[in-house]
Image (tube, rainbow, N blue to C red):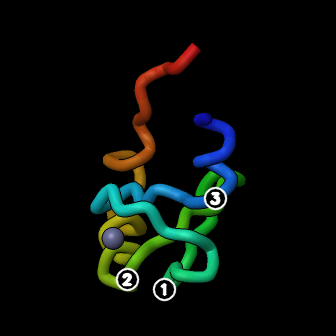
Amino acid sequence: MDEKESEKGNIDPVCGMTVTKEDAACSYEHKGKTYYFCAESCRDQFVSAPDNYTTIPPNK
Ligand SMILES: [Zn+2]
């Protein structure tokens, strides 16, 4: 189930919205991973402080 969801959409790390690649207003590559955002303002927030949004708890 998780795999299917991660294929279908990407979580906007700033606001938590699910954004598909088609829906994304913009994207940004950070440390080799591409993030998708619902709006440029979300991306701007991410770019200004990526560490705030990329500290994901370890998920084994
Ligand atoms: Zn957003």
**Is disc 2 in contact with disc 1, using a CB cutoff of under 8 Å?**
yes
Residue at numbered disc 3: 8
Task: Mark 1: give few (<14), some (14-19) or many (20+) Cα within 10 Å.
Answer: some
* Nearer to the camera, 50 or 22: 22
Element type where label 3 sits in the image: helix
Query: Where 2 falls versus 46 (above or below)?
Result: above
Q: Position of residue 26 (x, y in %)?
A: 52, 82
The residue drawn where x is 56% and y is 62% is 35
Mark 2, ligand 1, within 8 Å: the answer is yes
Residue at numbered disc 2: 39
Task: Choose the circle earlier in sequence order: 3 or 2.
Answer: 3
Q: What's the residue type where badge 2 is placed? A: Ala
Q: What's the residue type where badge 1 is placed? A: Ala
Location of the N terminus (image quadrant) = top right
Classify residue 47 as left or right of residue 29: left
Q: Which mark is residue 25?
A: 1
Q: Position of residue 40 (x, y in %)?
A: 39, 85
Classify residue 43 as left or right of residue 52: right
Q: What's the residue type where badge 3 is placed? A: Lys
Query: Where 21 falls versus 25 (above or below)?
Result: above
The residue drawn where x is 39% and y is 55% is 13
Mark 1, ligand 1, within 8 Å: the answer is no
Task: Choose the circle earlier in sequence order: 1 or 3.
Answer: 3
